[in-house]
Image (cartoon, rainbow, N blue to C red):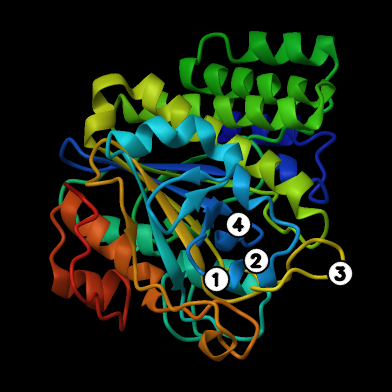
Amino acid sequence: MQSRRAFLTRGLALGCSAAASPFVTPVTFASAPGDNRLVVIVLRGAMDGLDVVRPLGDAHLATHRPSMDRDASLPLTDYFGLHPALAPLMPLWQTGELSVAHAVSTPYRDKRSHFDGQDILEAGVSGSDIGEDGWLNRALSLMPGTTSNTAFAVGHDNLRLLMGPAPTSTWSPDSDLDLSPQAQLLLQKVYAQDPLFHEAAMKAMELADLTDNPMATRRAQRAEALARFTADRLREDTRLAAFSITGWDTHANQARTLPNALGELSTAILTLKQDLGPIWQNTAVLCLTEFGRTVRENGSNGTDHGTGGAAIFAGGALKGGRIMGDWPGLAPGDLYKDRDLMPTRDVRQFAAWAMAGLFPLGQSALESTVFPGLGMGDNPGLIA
């Protein structure tokens, strides 16, 4: 088994480049007891919550974001509207399968490094000593009867979320693979008698073929492939899954670039819903980002690294159709350091309450082990 894994990883790594990070998307799985499922999607690059879920009722929004087409927003509440690129998700909002937490953040402050922010988000810790494990792996260690799927890997990256001593399985596709038709045929024959490795290899080559399509189409197809593979696992023994979506670092021309990332996210969520079928009713999807972006747009019609942001939740297990959190306002005196949305709640609290509602994890264990030092606060009622 190990020799086959090593061969597959080396063979498919040909032509891969870490510089092509938008096409290196790790997917991680683990199994756990019970019928509920949790999917965590890391939105790498810092999603602009103010553009995705727009506080249209705040009189200062127009001043801070003069280029935003506010009239195109989709109404969520009397105060908030949704970015039009997420129109496919509106039926989920109407059926209570979509929610948002606004003005949230991790404990990370001021340095605004993507790498540090993502590490802290996935480690789930309060301080700078993040260690080597992630909060999903620590949660697994507290669940009796957990196992890993048969181990397989394609690619060369992992999510910190599920790193740690508890057993997990990984599948890391690289869509920047450059395999000739002959090499693909050889790979199919080598793994023809090994269903798990054959499926992984075929999925990696499917993602590689997407590079011939335009960017927006390629991103949607990639998201569909990742979500479909995830749903396949969740229909079996897998109970926890995590993968990432890139493209949220919108320093320039945000009105043009952000819809691509939102389209990929929308496709991923709707593919999960479709492919999970009745299992969707026991599923929660947490879409989390490392930090928000500046309240004021910059001279390039984009936004820079900020602090407070938003988290998006989907799934049939939700008590949805709500904007959660305490809105701080956009008046100059309400901003964090006169530049960012003021965070009013720790995003880890929503993740912790989701875990508590889905799995046999008590508040004490969540606050001390899964998210060390976290005070979970009042239950937001995220899970139905």
- Between disc 4 and disc 1, the foreground one is 1
Is mark 1 in CB contact (under 8 Å) with mark 2? yes
Q: Is residue 17 left or right of residue 197?
A: right
User: Which residue position holds label 2?
Assistant: 62
Q: Residue at x 34, y 24 (%)?
A: 276
What residue type is disc 4 on?
Asp
Real-space CA distance between mark 1 and mark 2, rounded to the nearest whole angstrom = 7 Å
Real-space CA distance between mark 4 and mark 3, rounded to the nearest whole angstrom = 17 Å
- Position above or below: 85 against 127: above
Helix, strand, or loop for circle 4? helix
Identify the mark nearer the N-term, 4 or 1.
Answer: 4
User: Which residue position holds label 1?
Assistant: 59
**How many other residues sit within 10 Å of disc 1, few (<14), some (14-19) or many (≥20)?**
few
- Between disc 3 and disc 2, the foreground one is 2
Q: Residue at x 36, y 69 (%)?
A: 348
Identify the mark nearer the N-term, 3 or 2.
Answer: 2
User: Which residue position holds label 3?
Assistant: 299
Helix, strand, or loop for circle 3? loop
